Amino acid sequence: MVSLVLLGWWHVAAATTPRILLPAPAAVVATVIAEPSTFARAVAISGFTAAGGLGLGSVIGLGLAFVAVSSAPGRAVVEPTVVGFRIAPLTAVAPLVLLWFGTGVPVRVLLVSLMTTFPVTVASIDGLASTPQASLDLLASVGASEWQTFRSVRVPAALPSVFAGVKLGAALAVTGTVVAELLALRGGLGAGVWEAGRFVRTAELFAYLIVIALFGVAFYGTAALLERAVRRRWGIAD
């Protein structure tokens, strides 16, 4: 209902506003229909970058969380380091990284991972640290290793928290991908936004912004579906 109201408002406003400032919804749709392969290619490039960055950030985040939970000194080192990296804005770090390593997709994946590592690490630390002490004592009594304890008890107990971090990371991955592409100017939705804005192709710019929004919703939804599948695999109720 809200979407229909906004769409109606947009249509009415566009009728009394210069097209260079606010194109009509039909013009935006026509832009996408006219060049579907261009938008599809941009989505594919951005999707690969976002997925790669989220995957890398999640693996790093889980590893750091394991170190932090395993020992007090580890936590004292991990948490300030992760927070320090997160405080530095991507727009400040990216130019230096791009200068050092180039503007290819692997470098953009690395930049996105810098944004996704933080939420996964923090959420995973909270989840892994909340494992019931009785379960830990039971495994310790039978001589289970730290890895066995981690895999069989800590991970199942931490999954809700871990995926809360992953879903937040999914949203940040889309933002990081667009920012990295805007700075690198080599393919993807971010480069498309820059190109459309540079030549004042307003309808195309609106089209890219809408596609980015839909892409973000779909990416977040994929992370939510993955959570449901993993929880079902581990026998954890929703």
Image (spheres, grey):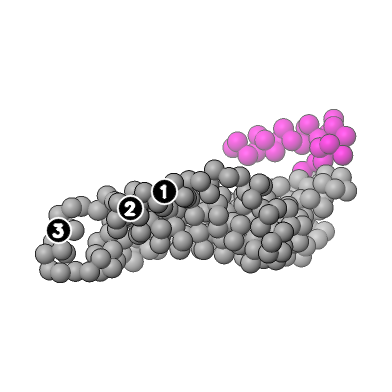
- Left/right placement of residue 88 relative to residue 156 reads right
Provide the major secondary structure of the magenta segment. Answer: helix
Identify the residue at the far left of this view.
Answer: 141
- Left/right placement of residue 25 relative to residue 67 reads right
**Looking at the rendered structure, which numbered label has been put on residue 137?**
3
Q: CA distance from mark 1 to mark 3?
A: 26 Å
Image quadrant of residue 16? top right
Image quadrant of residue 67? bottom left
The image position of residue 91, as x and y in percent, is: 66, 47
In magenta segment, residue 61: no
**Looking at the rendered structure, which numbered label has been put on residue 87?**
none
Numbered disc in front, either 2 or 1: 2
- Which one is in front, 192 or 87? 87
In magenta segment, residue 19: yes
Q: CA distance from mark 2 to mark 1?
A: 10 Å
Mark 1: give few (<14), some (14-19) or many (20+) Cα within 10 Å. Answer: some
Callout 2 amino acid: Pro
Helix, strand or loop at label 2? It is helix
Q: Which comes before the other along the chain, label 2 or label 3? A: 2
Helix, strand or loop at label 3? It is helix
Residue drawn where x is 85% and y is 48% of the image: 198
Residue drawn where x is 41% and y is 48% of the image: 79
* Residue under numbered circle 2: 73
**Looking at the rendered structure, which numbered label has been put on residue 79?**
1
Start and end of the magenta stretch?
1-25
How many marks the image carries: the answer is 3
Mark 2 and mark 1 in contact? Answer it, CB < 8 Å.
no
Callout 1 amino acid: Glu
Q: Which comes before the other along the chain, label 2 or label 1? A: 2
Quarter in which the N terminus is drawn: top right
Q: Which comes before the other along the chain, label 1 or label 3? A: 1
